[in-house]
Image (cartoon, rainbow, N blue to C red):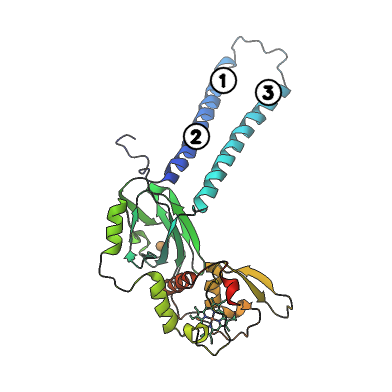
Amino acid sequence: MWNFPLFPEQASTTARQVDLIFLVELGVVVFFSVLICALIVFFAIRYRRGAKVNRDNPPIHSTAVEIIWVGIPLVITLGIFVVGTAIFFDIYAPPGDASRIYVVGKQWMWKLKHPEGKREINELHVPVGRPVELWMTSEDVIHSFYVPAFRIKQDVLPGRYTSIWFKPTKPGKYHLFCAEYCGTNHSRMGGWIYVMDPAEYEKWLTDGTQTDGTMAMQGKDLFVKHHCAGCHGVESTVKAPKLEGVYGSRVPITEGNEIQPHFVVADDRYIRSSILLPKSQVVAGYAPVMPSYQGQIGEDDLLTIIEYIKSLGSKGTRETRR
Ligand code: HEC
Ligand SMILES: [Cu+2]
């Protein structure tokens, strides 16, 4: 715009949509404010005391006027509602080809992880023009992931996964903030998003000192380290479900005295709660012998283990193992 930055830069596809609806609303508000103020002034002058105007038979009812002043605002507000809702749904439904970045908020920093294994703190590198889904949770209190230039802001909650996505449109360096007061150093909980040229990004992603492999590979190590493999592994003598193909499948669950199982979809949230609260949803046909890992595995490692379980195959392949 001008040199006086009323708006942060527009650096994502969402930014354009959000600004569009904002400006339309602002325009509507300004238009009606000016119109109403002008009419007030006009009538105040025209019908001021002593003015020689005709005051006989003032109209006290006009159906036409009433229809107009209900109808026009109705159409305008419904229009804003429809467009706003469409944008809202769009912001929360990542496109199929979005790549995931895992985010853990923690007093007072952002920990970010790429599925390729690369870790970052308070910095995120992404390629331009490719949609990115942020899959987020908090290690402690409520935080909020806020990138003004992308016009995205999403609360990051302990004990829950939330997500939002963006598609950067311009290479550059953009501010990242925490937008939820989260304690003493809240104001310093921020960083930068680096939007890079795709080729440069590939280079950034693959060079470096980290050698512990992709997230799935790291997850496999954790799977062994926490003795999950002792029960879920191929050589296990414990009767535990194999995890190949579980991701995205429909899992039969029996609760309490239920005889007929009901089905739940094994998404990230299900797998997380399977690890932390295994007794809350016991797979039909198995004994509730899995120990709870609450307090023993951090959010970071949980995401990493889930990424490993995902890598074991998803939806559809599961039937073959039973
Ligand atoms: C003592 C043996 C044991 C250990 C150790 C164990 N599990 Fe389990 N796990 C089970 C059993 C038995 C079930 C099925 C009953 C249930 O749902 O609790 C299960 C269920 C699951 C499920 C749900 C599977 C499905 O088909 O829906 C997941 C996911 C899972 N475990 C992951 C893990 C992870 C990750 C670890 C390590 C952090 C782990 N388990 C450690 C025995 C174990
Ligand atoms: Cu915070």
Q: Nearer the viewer, mark 3 or mark 2?
A: 2
Q: Which residue is mark 1?
A: 44
Q: CA distance from mark 3 to mark 2?
A: 25 Å
Q: Which residue is mark 3?
A: 65
* Residue 268 rendering spot, x and y as whole percentages: 52, 68
Secondary structure under the numbered disc 1 in the rendered image: helix
Write down the quadrant of residue 75 in the picture.
Answer: top right
Left or right of 118, for residue 251:
right
Point out the tag, 3 or 1, that comes first from the N-terminus. 1
Secondary structure under the numbered disc 2 in the rendered image: helix
Write down the quadrant of residue 116 in the picture.
Answer: bottom left
Secondary structure under the numbered disc 3 in the rendered image: helix
Q: In this orientation, does residue 41 appear?
A: yes
Residue found at x 33% / y 45%: 170
Q: Nearer the viewer, mark 2 or mark 1?
A: 2
Using the image as rendered, state which of residue 85 and residue 28 is in the foreground: 85
Residue type at numbered disc 2: Val
* Residue 86 rendering spot, x and y as whole percentages: 55, 44
Point out the tag, 3 or 2, that comes first from the N-terminus. 2
Q: Which residue is mark 2?
A: 24
